[in-house]
Image: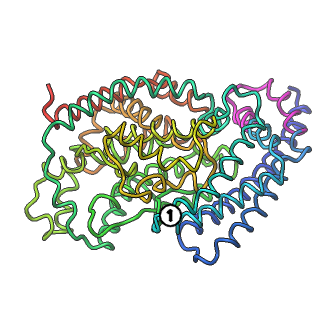
Amino acid sequence: MTTDQRTAFDTRFAELRERLAEIQDLTSIGAVLGWDRSTYLPEGGAAARGRQSAVLSRIRHAKATDADLGRLIDGLERDVEALEADSFEARLVRVARRDFDRATRLPSDFVARMSRHTSETYGAWTKARPANDFAAMVPRLEQTLELSRQYSAFFPEFSHPMDVFVDGSDEGMTVQKVRAVFAELREGLVPLVRAVTERPEPRTDFVGRAYDVATQLRFGESVARDYGYDFSRGRQDLTAHPFMTRFSIDDVRITTRVQENDLTDALFSTLHETGHALYEQNVDRAFEGLPLARGASAGVHESSSRLWENVVGRSRGFWARYFGPLRDTFPQQLADVSEEEMYRAVNVVRKSLIRTDADELTYNLHVILRFELELAMIEGTLEVRDLADAWHARYESDLGMRAPDDRDGVLQDVHWFGGLIGGAFHGYTLGNILSLQFWDAAVKAHPGIPGEIERGEFGALRGWLTQNVYRFGRSRAAAEVARNATGSELTVAPYLAYLRGKYGELYNLS
């Protein structure tokens, strides 16, 4: 590339950055509306919020599919062939091409209709769940399923109609690949769950005592600060279904939920969302305002949240450090509780109805069940009107339990009621698997990490994750991130080894 060619390239690349930054700002504005919808929006505002979201989606989609943007990407693709494949410019152009190609498949009116429908459906769900009224959601969910199938039809190159959703959240993954991973995981999990649930349960009575709500929130926030979450660039609020959202690298927000009679719900929700936020707050600042400034995939993002929530937050080392301060915070409620009892209580294995409350062992069974129900709906072998019954039947066959109502059954997860149907859940389990690959690699590089956790020191672990995962944002695909950080593609073995070791010791399994 000559000097003149480089100058011309730099001019066009600057235009690309400007265009992508504008699209990203519109995306962030939409995220603000979504955050407000899930936190402070008054009930009466749901319909207007749906209209606002639809208008914004239409404007954003027009920018993201502009023909001039496509021509700009075409020219830059030819030019970046002369650059290093790992260069910032080459990686941004690659992501811009992927996003442009996906966006241009979708008609503008479809995008607006989809955005308005999902926003209004979320508002309806917030009322239907506490009322245990799945029947009210059936017509809306039928429309969601139809929109999901229409969305898939815009991408006929995928061999399975749900592949477009799976690839959209985890680039390079397919339904076939996810099924293979889940089959291997299930084969290892089922006998382990059976063996553990046949053993006596540890003491957990103290978890359900009365704990002041505001004090619980303060304690969780103190641990989030220790983890490294920067509250000057974020905040925590309450919501029905906890989530993390980002408006920029300097505005990354988390939410949680809190119950007076459950000491662990708010804490582990906070730790989970903090794991997501640490990822977003530590992306390379050079990516600010660009589509590179977010996580590589749903699975890689979940690896961070599950690592900080479970691998760290439910470890012996964590409770060696934090049980004393927690008991000092709630001296009356925890006066008769030991550190060992607390450690065992937060790791109790118990077949349960609620995915977000599930323990490490049974959690993935909840995910696999949802993934297979999604597949059945997309493939047309399960009608929405039969979904609640199918849900109960699967819980009875897979976990030996049946929810007393739909509130704790099919209505419990927001995903199908706040978005499309397809690819909504598999990333949670991919994240669990990756979390152990990243943990093992981090401890191999820094053997002192477990001891540091016992002292409430998380800099080495956070630093390794930043250096090897977080900083790359979306500039590297998930498979590349995993391979470079751990020396391996996604593999189930480390995760199963971790579960067998930890719960074998906890439940005295031979």
Instruction: Identify whether 500 is placed above or below 18.
Output: above
- The residue to which callout 1 is attached is 133
Q: Label 1 amino acid? A: Asp
Residue 114 % position (x, y): 72, 54
- Residue drawn at x 78%, y 43% is 103
Q: Is residue 450 magenta?
A: no
Horizontally, residue 34 falls left or right of residue 22, namely left
Residue 214's quadrant in the figure?
Answer: bottom left
Q: Is residue 92 magenta?
A: yes
Instruction: Identify whether 501 is placed above or below 402.
Output: above
Mark 1: give few (<14), some (14-19) or many (20+) Cα within 10 Å. some
- Residue drawn at x 87%, y 33% is 74
Q: Of helix, strand and loop, which one carries label 1?
A: loop
Magenta stretch secondary structure, dominant = helix
Q: Nearer the viewer, residue 280 or 81?
A: 280
Q: Nearer the viewer, residue 503 or 378?
A: 378
Residue 238 % position (x, y): 45, 68
Residue 95's quadrant in the figure?
Answer: top right
Residue 22 % position (x, y): 78, 55
- Residue drawn at x 43%, y 60% is 407
Q: Nearer the viewer, residue 412 or 290?
A: 412
Specify start and end residues of the magenta stretch as a single range: 71-95
Horizontally, residue 282 falls left or right of residue 405, namely right
Res 472 seen here = no
Horizontally, residue 386 falls left or right of residue 3, namely left
